[in-house]
Image (spheres, rainbow, N blue to C red):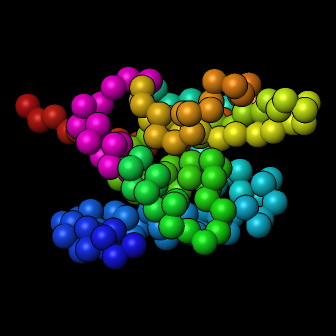
């Protein structure tokens, strides 16, 4: 643990702040799980509306940093930080950076026939969270978080 702490101290301030923000948003997303999903759903984005799959080169580095921060910090939470919590936290991180994303909710049956659920987050062609298991699940809902761009004014 001491080795990890000494590594954290050597990180640039920007990285430390992103990790702290990821941790706080994981806590916020976990608290949302205490609220009935019907009340939380409207805050997640536009139901059943995907965001574009187009690649935005200027976002690629940030997408990787957000994915890494969520993955790393979810290991240090004392609360459950599984797929839905990670997806919601990452979606909020991206929204704060004006990057569109889509949160997918899926269901499947496990080996014993019990219904199980999974969530994953995509931005452009990149999967930020939950990609490891998404192939097993049938999408039953999704929420698109489209970011409105300011129109450029052209003179002349």
> How many discs appear?
0
Q: Position of residue 39 (x, y in %)?
A: 77, 58
**Residue 5 horizontal side relative to residue 73, left or right:** left
The structure residue drawn at horizontal position 61% and vertical position 59%, both measured from the top left corner, is: 81
The range drawn in magenta is 53-66
Q: Which of 42 and 61 is in front in this view?
A: 61
The structure residue drawn at horizontal position 42% and vertical position 26%, both measured from the top left corner, is: 125
Q: Where is residue 79 in the image (x, y as percent from the top left)?
A: 64, 69
Q: Relative to residue 29, is residue 103 depicted above or below?
A: above
What predominant SS class does the magenta segment belong to? helix
- Magenta stretch holds residue 143: no
- Residue 79 in view here: yes
The residue furthest left is 156
Quarter of the image for residue 55 reads top left
Q: Position of residue 99 (x, y in %)?
A: 38, 44
Q: Quadrant of the N terminus?
A: bottom left
Q: Which of 2 and 36 is in front in this view?
A: 2
- Magenta stretch holds residue 61: yes
Q: Relative to residue 53, is residue 116 depicted above or below?
A: below
Q: Nearer the viewer, residue 48 or 80?
A: 80
**Residue 83 horizontal side relative to residue 125, left or right:** right
- Residue 44 in view here: no
**Residue 150 horizontal side relative to residue 103, left or right:** left
Q: In which quarter of the image is the C terminus?
A: top left
**Residue 141 horizontal side relative to residue 22, left or right:** right
Q: Relative to residue 136, is residue 129 depicted above or below?
A: below
Q: Where is residue 72 in the image (x, y as percent from the top left)?
A: 43, 57
The structure residue drawn at horizontal position 25% and vertical position 68%, both measured from the top left corner, is: 7
Q: Relative to residue 91, is residue 137 depicted above or below?
A: above
The structure residue drawn at horizontal position 16% and vertical position 34%, both measured from the top left corner, is: 154
């Amino acid at each position: 643990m001491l080795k990890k702490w000494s590594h954290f101290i050597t990180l640039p301030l920007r990285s430390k702040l992103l990790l702290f923000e990821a941790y706080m948003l994981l806590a916020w997303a976990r608290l949302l799980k205490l609220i009935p999903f019907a009340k939380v759903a409207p805050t997640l984005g536009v139901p059943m509306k995907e965001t574009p799959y187009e690649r935005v080169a200027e976002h690629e580095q940030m997408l990787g940093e957000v994915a890494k921060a969520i993955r790393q910090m979810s290991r240090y939470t004392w609360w459950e930080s599984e797929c839905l919590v990670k997806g919601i936290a990452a979606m909020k991180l991206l929204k704060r950076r004006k990057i569109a994303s889509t949160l997918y909710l899926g269901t499947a049956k496990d080996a014993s026939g019990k219904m199980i659920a999974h969530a994953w987050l995509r931005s452009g062609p990149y999967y930020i969270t939950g990609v490891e298991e998404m192939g097993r699940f049938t999408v039953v809902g999704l929420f698109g978080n489209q970011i409105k761009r300011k129109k450029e004014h052209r003179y002349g």
